Image (cartoon, rainbow, N blue to C red):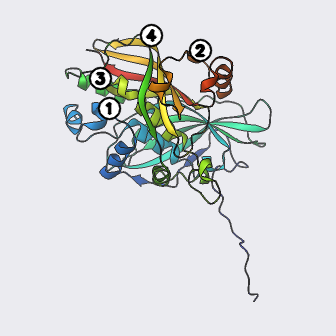
Amino acid sequence: MQGFLKPNRKVSYGLDLNRVSIGQEIISHFNVTVDESVHSLWSGLMPTSSYPENSREFASILGFHEMFLPYGFLLNLTLSLGVESFAHSSLLHLEVRKALYLNPAFAGDTFSCAILIKEIKDTSNGNYSTIVSEHVLSNQKGEPVFSLERVTLFPKINNAEKQKTDFIEPLKNHHFKEKILARVRGIAIENKINDFREGDLLLHPFVRPVGKSENLFWATYFKNSHPIHFNYQRYKPGEIIISGGIVLSMVLGISGREFRQLLLPQVDRAFHVVPVVAEDRLGAFSYVKSSEQIMPGFEELDVRTFGLRNVDTELELSDADFPVELFNGLDRPADVERVLEEKCPALKGKICCVADWKALRKAE
């Protein structure tokens, strides 16, 4: 027997690109039980302003035995539980769509995630492939509590059928929203601003970093196993990326302070423009696209929020002129950067994400 051995086994993580197909279902390898301490830690990371995020008494008034887990927390858990068995082999997370809170989820629940491959297509240059997948988070009773669509860039997939297929989507419902609306009808809620209108542009004063330790903790807790989030031996400190879900949740949390009291957010579509690295400072500004009274006493704001990196929003942008093109349907990172380069170069490289979302509020 020789005195040396070479490594001869390696476990592959992520999607097997040689066996992927439309309609394929992938079950996450993890079951995660969330306890109250994690809920508290999340509240220490994310800015929270509204009663549903902070008050057990308010949850009790709504008829729930506990505060339900925050929207952003479930969004991150849904995304991250799909990393090891799906996204670990991807190149880039492009977009989140239709992120819906389906049923109340509480501390003490145990969660698992299932992923469905809905569409595979080649990029315009033919060098890569994009996959549209649906991710559904369920509790220990098998009840779906959160769902979203994810668009992800992979190396070119050669052997899969790539045409789009229509799927029945029974989970895309608003039962949880309807339950909240029914229960909050007779409860007085004081809002910071009551009269948002189409065309309003808000600078959100809150600016907050995501620190190295915070990033490492949440990447580990959420089972986000991609090395770019934590491997300081492979990547330099300035190359460690904050996951897109954390960035999106932070940007929504920062903007929520001015939109409170939020009953429930809903991300229709969000994409990232430039990466955010550990210790970057995150801020935001928002544009109100419309305000709709969905029933007497309630309004739903259609908002486009821009995440900023390393900008003191209120101090540095109070006299800024923003190109109107930013608010009129740009849907690709390259388009955002092009408009900034042409008309607002001071912000080029500073906008990290764009989120089109709805803010459900009680309008007194």
Residue at 29%, 15% (x, y): give it: 363
The amino acid beneath tag 4 is Glu
Taking 219 as reference, is 350 above or below it? above
State which mark lies toward you, 4 or 2: 2
| Quadrant of the frame with the N terminus | bottom right
Q: Circle 3: is it few (<14), some (14-19), or many (20+) Cα within 10 Å?
A: many
Circle 1 sits in a helix, a strand or a loop, which is it? loop
Residue at 47%, 32% (x, y): give it: 283
Taking 314 as reference, is 64 above or below it? below
State which mark lies toward you, 4 or 3: 4
Residue tagged by mark 4? Answer: 198
Q: Which mark is residue 181?
A: 3
Residue tagged by mark 1? Answer: 49
Q: Which mark is residue 38?
A: none
| Quadrant of the frame with the C terminus | top left
Question: Do the residues under discs 3 and 2 have CB atoms within 8 angstroms?
Answer: no
Tell how many labels: 4
Q: Which mark is residue 323?
A: 2
* Side of 279 relative to 143 (left or right): right
The amino acid beneath tag 1 is Ser
The amino acid beneath tag 3 is Leu
Q: Circle 4: is it few (<14), some (14-19), or many (20+) Cα within 10 Å?
A: some
Circle 2 sits in a helix, a strand or a loop, which is it? loop
* Side of 354 relative to 34 (left or right): right
Of pointers 4 and 2, the one earlier in the residue sequence: 4
Residue 87 location (% of width, % of height): 61, 46
C-alpha separation, residue under disc 3 versus residue under disc 1: 19 Å
